[in-house]
Image: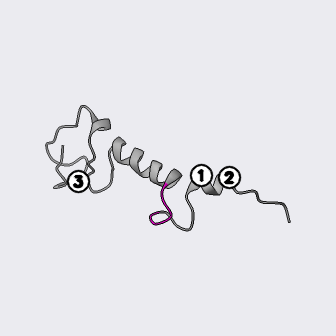
Amino acid sequence: MLGGMGQCGTGNYTVCGEPEKFLFWDFFHPSQHAYVLISKAFWGGKPSRIRPMNLRQLAELNVSAV
């Protein structure tokens, strides 16, 4: 694990064996767990965090053809 101190692919580091259990990232790549949290927020996040609406609200819109 880089511990946020180096770039991916450089130096001597180890890879986390259980990335789904931890929230971490290097300069470019969030962990699988971070992507899960981000996608859940985009899909069903509260209006105070995801504006003007989350993806669930957008998918449920009844938009008539003009």
Q: Are marks 2 and 1 in contact (CB under 8 Å)?
A: yes
Task: Kindly identify which residue carries mark 1.
Answer: 56
Residue 31 magenta: no
User: Helix, strand, or loop for circle 3?
Assistant: loop
Please tell me whether the stretch drawn in magenta is mainly helix, strand or loop: loop
**Residue 42: image x %, image y %?**
49, 55
Task: Kindly identify which residue carries mark 2.
Answer: 60
Amino acid type of disc 2? Glu
Ranked by sequence position, the earlier of labels 1 and 3 is 3
Q: Is residue 14 above or below residue 50?
A: above
Q: How far apart are labels 1 and 3 at the CA level?
A: 35 Å
Identity of the residue drawn at 19% across and 54% down: 4
**Residue 65: image x %, image y %?**
84, 61
Amino acid type of disc 1? Arg
Q: How far apart are labels 2 and 1 at the CA level?
A: 6 Å
The stretch of residues the image draws in magenta is 45-49
Tell me the tag on residue 37. none
**Residue 1: image x %, image y %?**
18, 43
Q: How crowded is mark 1: few (under 14 residues within 10 Å), some or many (20 or more)?
A: few
Task: Kindly identify which residue carries mark 3.
Answer: 7
Residue 46 magenta: yes
